[in-house]
Amino acid sequence: MNMSNTVTMTTVEIAELTGKRHDNVLRDARAVVSQVNALKSEAIETVYTDGRSREKPMLVLDKHLTFTLITGYDTGLRHNVVGRWIELEQAANPAFAAQAITETLKDLQSRVDAMAPVYDEHVHKGRTVGYSWREACRLADIDHPDKLLALMVTQGKARKTTQGHTQLHPRYEQAGFIKTLKPSNLVVSRNGGHLFKITHKGLNEWLKTKASTMNTAVTEAAKPKAVQDDHGYVVEIAGENTSRMTTTDL
């Protein structure tokens, strides 16, 4: 995109250039915007119309945020995005010369080099000590980590110990998504009382891929709903802020 000769790129176009799903690119872009406290002028929330004439959200990113976003992508994907960016700058400025292209590539490389140690530390942390539950949920763009964990307990996917600690079902460790902690581990007290840490695999292959579904499940669980006994009588109204509700409120 070219708004008043200011070159920008949308998350839709980045998704097309990289072959990634747009919802995943949008999620990654929003995480970057949140982590760097980007200004509204640097990342503009807007909508586009998909192939089925539906309005969907997208972000319009400036050069800095575009390059920051693609830092975590592999060389081939970065190459595609940078190539398109050069085309956009040439269109915005007909006098754009080979020297400008060189400077653009140097700029990108310097940003990648600057981000690489942070990215490596992030990956190293996930592969060694792991992420806390709330930290992993923040990185995965999960809105309500505590409510999600409580929902997992009610679904039998997690449980509370007699000491008040939270454990996840063993299948999550078997899948490589978590590392379990012993109650005696000093990290537990700083980890919200959770007897687990999220691994790099758990963050990327579990939480990030299911973030949308998890957010929807938490929202649905919060809605008031009648709980019936075996005879069909309403014995409880479950959900958030339902302590004084009656069946007539449903």
Image (cartoon, rainbow, N blue to C red):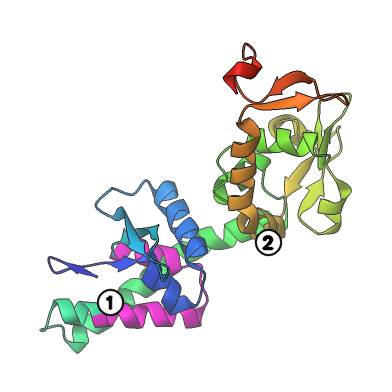
**Magenta segment range?**
63-87
Q: Given the image, on which type of amino acid does mark 1 rest?
A: Thr
Residue 172 is situated, as x and y percent measured from the top left of the image, at 81, 52
Position of 91 relative to 177 (above/below): below
Q: Give the Cα distance between marks 1 and 2.
A: 33 Å
Which of the image's four quarters has the N terminus?
bottom left
> Taking 173 as reference, is 53 left or right?
left
Position of 102 relative to 70 (above/below): below
Q: Residues within 10 Å of mark 1 (few under 14, many from 20)?
A: some
Residue 205: mark: 2
**Viewer-closest of 2 and 58:** 58
Tag 1 residue = 104
Magenta-colored stretch includes residue 81: yes
Secondary structure found at label 1: helix
**Viewer-closest of 49 and 227:** 227
Residue 96 is situated, as x and y percent measured from the top left of the image, at 15, 83
Residue 99 is situated, as x and y percent measured from the top left of the image, at 20, 85
Q: Residues within 10 Å of mark 2 (few under 14, many from 20)?
A: some
Residue occupying image coordinates x 74% and y 19% = 236
